[in-house]
Image: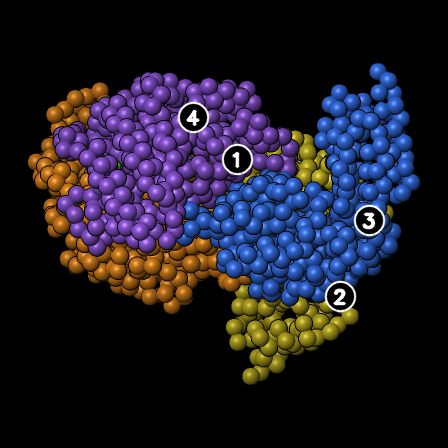
Chain colours: A orange, B yellow, C blue, D purple
Amino acid sequence: MSDHHDRWIDLRSDTVTQPSAAMRAAMAAAPVGDDVYADDPTVNRLQDFAAELFGFEAGLFAPSGTQTNLIALMTHCGRGDEYLVGQEAHTYKYEGGGAAVLGSIQPQPIANQPDGSIAISDIAAYIKPDDMHFARTRVLALENTIGGRVLPRDYVKAATDFAHAKGLVTHLDGARVCNAAVRQGIPLRDAAAGFDTVSVCLSKGLGAPVGSVLLGPRAFIEQGKRWRKMLGGGMRQAGVIAAAAHYALAHNVERLAEDHQNAADLSAGLARIEPLKVTTPQTNIFYVEIPEAACAPLHEALARQGIRASIGPHTRLVTHLDVTAADVKKTIAAFEAFFLDWNKQ
Amino acid sequence: MSDHHDRWIDLRSDTVTQPSAAMRAAMAAAPVGDDVYADDPTVNRLQDFAAELFGFEAGLFAPSGTQTNLIALMTHCGRGDEYLVGQEAHTYKYEGGGAAVLGSIQPQPIANQPDGSIAISDIAAYIKPDDMHFARTRVLALENTIGGRVLPRDYVKAATDFAHAKGLVTHLDGARVCNAAVRQGIPLRDAAAGFDTVSVCLSKGLGAPVGSVLLGPRAFIEQGKRWRKMLGGGMRQAGVIAAAAHYALAHNVERLAEDHQNAADLSAGLARIEPLKVTTPQTNIFYVEIPEAACAPLHEALARQGIRASIGPHTRLVTHLDVTAADVKKTIAAFEAFFLDWNKQ
Amino acid sequence: MSDHHDRWIDLRSDTVTQPSAAMRAAMAAAPVGDDVYADDPTVNRLQDFAAELFGFEAGLFAPSGTQTNLIALMTHCGRGDEYLVGQEAHTYKYEGGGAAVLGSIQPQPIANQPDGSIAISDIAAYIKPDDMHFARTRVLALENTIGGRVLPRDYVKAATDFAHAKGLVTHLDGARVCNAAVRQGIPLRDAAAGFDTVSVCLSKGLGAPVGSVLLGPRAFIEQGKRWRKMLGGGMRQAGVIAAAAHYALAHNVERLAEDHQNAADLSAGLARIEPLKVTTPQTNIFYVEIPEAACAPLHEALARQGIRASIGPHTRLVTHLDVTAADVKKTIAAFEAFFLDWNKQ
Amino acid sequence: MSDHHDRWIDLRSDTVTQPSAAMRAAMAAAPVGDDVYADDPTVNRLQDFAAELFGFEAGLFAPSGTQTNLIALMTHCGRGDEYLVGQEAHTYKYEGGGAAVLGSIQPQPIANQPDGSIAISDIAAYIKPDDMHFARTRVLALENTIGGRVLPRDYVKAATDFAHAKGLVTHLDGARVCNAAVRQGIPLRDAAAGFDTVSVCLSKGLGAPVGSVLLGPRAFIEQGKRWRKMLGGGMRQAGVIAAAAHYALAHNVERLAEDHQNAADLSAGLARIEPLKVTTPQTNIFYVEIPEAACAPLHEALARQGIRASIGPHTRLVTHLDVTAADVKKTIAAFEAFFLDWNKQ
Ligand SMILES: [Ca+2]
Ligand SMILES: [Ca+2]
Ligand SMILES: [Ca+2]
Ligand SMILES: [Ca+2]
Ligand SMILES: [Ca+2]
Ligand SMILES: [Ca+2]
């Protein structure tokens, strides 16, 4: 980056969150051991805490959500099995195709509905018959939140019940499931209900520097450890980062409501600006339509004000614990100033 | 099968075609050699003949269309590359997911339009940016005919031009491309135009007992031989079956028009029967909606008359060189008789 | 090949065997059906006949031994499982690594002993402990004959008993198991004893143009059909080649003794020629050490006499049903004449 | 663990090393950013520092050596390529077969010589000809140190020169390459000379809690980032652990000499005890033969003294920065006391 600012307002993603001083203190103080030998007390404590919080038997800490999702799919699916997933799902689209490429699993992506769900009639239609022409359908994978949208609780119940009735396993890419729970005002375990396994990211809105946790039955987690090891996710004194993750999960869930409020305020502020078209956020993510010709100069104008965003015709904006209410105001002002000029041309 | 008939009318698929006496004579007389050493003159002759006919540099004979399509994708795509394909495409849906499972290739299925095409706007939307989050989009794979529908020539030209402009390779699953060409009244090489590689099945409407041929540039075919060998498609004195395939390609293309006429007649005859809903065939395949309760008794009634069909609520019927105009009349009569009774209930 | 001969003496491999007139007649007369629907009576008859002959529940016909071995390994091993195999084994070394590359199976090759066996102490040493650092050892794969050597019956019993005691499955690459049985003067089923599954090639010494058969328990064969389909080995009216394979198995087993005699005679004849070093064949394959400088002129001299061989410093010579006793004499004479000259230089 | 000690003497592996106070301070103070956007200054600084130190263009930080080795192999080898590797190599044997299972790469393991090298004549013999029967040999992978043995410099030069002359790429699993360099008294870049790419573990003797770094040409590292992302090794504010890794590399290399001295002392002390058979360490690892019956009671006796070791008939003992000279004396005394008793029986 050519511009220098003491502190950027970074709206690109909630992955950019920085570990706080308290989190760093927790890391510095954490007792650690060799987690490949299952000897790291801080990792074990995190895994147990997360499992308890979300209502599962056991947990597995790994370096990323890409890996926890991949471990889940490789544990649920043998070579040649198939999983049903949304066309827009991170697991299918944004993780390089790892399930197919590394895991020899057939993906069956299905169009997401406008609310982020996968229609149950589509799930029914895409389950393959037991015939050697077809891959064996094994898993329904949902994502919540997806593109910032919260899956309705009734839908989640209906979809997972339907999947189970058809003999499928259900997996949740819960990278931002805490945002969903907070938005819906329900406990984390209720947000995870219906799923056999869940992946939760700790380095997004929760603010930990590194790591995700995979939750499920104990036997599943034991098998998952093999794939984690093979994928290169077996870490040694991983307690140093698990300490931060534990802190994040213990302290930073409820405050996601602030991010949601900031997103709502930012969205409302931008919606008043001509010619922007702005979606209404359900959580901490929303989208802005920007005229193509404005994108490059807007990007520059924002950068000069210390604001980072992935500006394009279809811009995603994300709030998180390092974006304050004041930052929101400053950002709205920066957009206003830019388009005041722009609209004069 | 519990019923015995001297000769079945088999409407399940055009794969059931039997080798004719002339074809068997060609097999019996064929000079052969060890094709793994490229020493089989009959295989070489078939490969050259097919390449010439469809306008390609070279050809490769293999035991099935599943394998020629898989060889094509594995030659075009390295580990981690992606191909765009229709949700209904045989290559994606009906071949067990081999591209993903065996080839470590990411499939990106896209909804087929009602005419069997993939919208060019969808092709544009599904090509991934060059970013490490995404698989590398490499191939556009179309199928013609698809579900008996013929892709419009203008569409094929526009789609393959667009793909090439975007740096993609184009592959045609031309299992039934001869049906398309005959229907459109164009030479085979015109039906293959726009595609870098084409797979053609010889054991369907053309009537050969076994085999498909993959066509493309010479260097592509040389690389394809490696994958054919690894997949177990390297055969020895394969000339015995290539002789039949050659016969099929030399003698049985133009006569596909009869199959199309028979399909049209059968479709028209069935359309007059209450309560059937029948599609209008473009080639040798069409679909009939049948009340679910009628399916099992209809299946039995047909079998008693020596007629085999995969009867279900959404029945596919297929004509081919072992279905005559008389067979069509007999089949219509059998349906009529059945529903005459059925409608009385 | 630049030289033209009415009939070559081809000592490169027993894969070059040509279908006989009787075999071609069997092909021409065979009733066929669509084997993907399991409707081909000739394929079914071959599979049953082979299963009965070798003492197994069921059989599966496929286009090559590379594919039957790969189907066996993919059926026995899930993703990440390991098989023990000889360093010189065809399955490991000569099939492009398909088990690893396509099947996601870890190969553990072990040095072959001079007699072609794998030492039981090595089998013991290479079985991995149940620990997530290691692949899960699942299969012991032997090959018989291997490089023309016959595995001793006591060894086969001891090795397969040991493997079973350790919880492994046993697979035999029996590409030339009929040669082993004939040499040992035992029934085919005794030669297959101890193995859970066996792959038998019909296109080598037995003389069929195309095909191998995989034998094993019925449930294994049913699962194997899925992998055959995915690999592209599902053929349609495959009865046309299964008829030849059936003929080969019914008529050409006992006569392998002639090939063994011819190999013995050829080996003895060559062993008398200075400076050749010749191994003593146990079956139809032996090796000749040839001075490097002599290789190219010898290859040419033989070709002028209508003799094909893969001449190199370490030349493999192979007899089969298209090599007669007279051919052996002619070949010895050709070598003698060449080295008479050569030794004068 | 049932026994409780304030501080264990842990001889199982050098992976058990704990981050020091200074290292934790470095972690607490490190500026961080989102490394998936390449925005983490501490990760970038580590990668550059390591690249410079070992003489490469660029570096890539990842959560484990299993992953850096796998990334290297997947970047060097396409689907179906082969790598030559020692039978005892960690990459082949101890990483679950990831290269084959996830990477579709054919492993060609070769017997290690007693000094840990792979004979150059074996390398020559195992390179496959360019023929479709064989996988394409692409990489020679060595490991240094291997089982604590240091590969002779002349050997490394000869082997890598030979590999390059044959068109292969060379990769070093340098998990403990710093131990090799210190033992040989040469700069790290000399220990890495001859290799196109090197993987270095920072969490073993160097004492970092988590992480390895892969070094090589810039274009290779750029491609490697794709595989790291797909494998789930793309971390966010990874600077918190990279800071410790940087500290380890900056401060803990030269002190490995102490570990080597401690290993020598421990080995010498144990060698004096009946009936132990002890190897002479070249670096920080050696092996002790222990009568099977003594193993379980010895393990317990050591645990009671606060000493952890993976006691078995063939025990590996490892020294590292958390094992002091006093610990060595205490360990020798514990063994002596145990065998004094044991020998009386
Ligand atoms: Ca973060
Ligand atoms: Ca046919
Ligand atoms: Ca794969
Ligand atoms: Ca043959
Ligand atoms: Ca450590
Ligand atoms: Ca694979």
Q: Secondary structure at mark 4?
A: loop
Q: Are marks 3 and 4 in contact (CB under 8 Å)?
A: no
In the depicted structure, whether residue C328 falls above or below residue B278: above
Q: Position of residue C182 (x, y in %)?
A: 77, 54
Q: Quadrant of residue A56?
A: bottom left
Q: Position of residue C140 (x, y in %)?
A: 56, 52
Marks 2/1: CA distance?
68 Å
Q: Chain of mark 1?
A: D
Which residue is depicted at the point 34% across and 29% down? D283
Q: Amino acid at mark 2?
A: Ala
Position of C339 relative to A16 (above/below): above
- Gap between marks 3 and 4 measured at Cα: 56 Å
Residue position for label 3: C19
- A182 or C189, which is in the foreground? C189
Mark 2 — on which chain does it sit?
B
Note whether ligand 4 is within 8 Å of mark 3: yes
Q: Residue at x 48, y 41 (%)?
A: D100
Same chain under badges 4 and 1? The reply is: yes
Q: Are marks 1 and 3 on the same chain?
A: no
Q: Of the residues shown, which amino acid type is indicated by label 3?
A: Pro
Q: Are marks 4 and 2 on the same chain?
A: no
Reading the image, the residue beneath label 2 is B326
Asked if one can make out residue A271 in the rendered structure from this viewpoint, the answer is: no
Question: In the rendered view, does A224 fall on the left or right side of A131?
Answer: left
Disc number lying in front (4 or 2): 4
Q: Which residue is mark 1?
A: D110
Density class for disc 1 (Cα within 10 Å; few <14, some 14-19, many ≥20) is many
Residue topped by disc 4: D151
Report the chain holding disc 3.
Answer: C
Q: Earlier in the sequence, mark 4 or mark 1?
A: 1
